[in-house]
Amino acid sequence: MDMELNEWVVLILLALVAIFALVFASFGAGSTQATIGLLIAAAAVVAIFYRVKQYFDRVDASRH
């Protein structure tokens, strides 16, 4: 079972969100801006891992 195009697009968009959030955090003038950027980046990474987990769960379910 291959990943569909829309799944790839979502993963790429989430990766871009994580990268932009890290850039936002690095250029933050205060600690609040840096914290928000890091939290958004962490949330995007968690979402990426969750999407990958969903894919492997679907593959595993199709085998049984």
Image: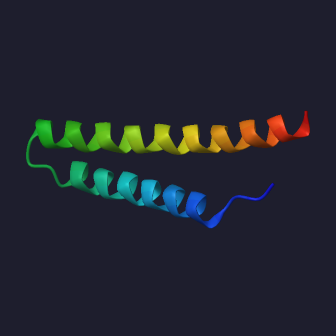
Q: What is the x, y in percent for residue 53?
A: 65, 38
Q: Is residue 27 left or right of residue 54?
A: left
Q: Is residue 8 above or below residue 46?
A: below
Q: What is the x, y in percent for residue 19?
A: 38, 57
Depth check, front residue: 40 or 10: 10
Q: Is residue 3 left or right of residue 35?
A: right
Q: The C terminus is located in which quarter?
A: top right
Give the residue displayed 56% in from the left and 62% down from the top.
6
Furthest-right residue in view? 64
Q: Is residue 35 left or right of residue 22?
A: left
Furthest-left residue in view? 29
Depth check, front residue: 7 or 23: 7
Depth check, front residue: 1 or 48: 1
Total labels: the figure holds 0
Give the residue displayed 22% in from the left and 54% down from the top.
24
Name the colouring of the figure. rainbow
Q: What is the x, y in percent for residue 31?
A: 13, 37
Q: The N terminus is located in which quarter?
A: bottom right
Residue 55: name its quadrant.
top right
Give the residue displayed 70% in from the left and 58% down from the top.
3
Q: Is residue 50 above or below residue 11?
A: above
Residue 63: name its quadrant.
top right
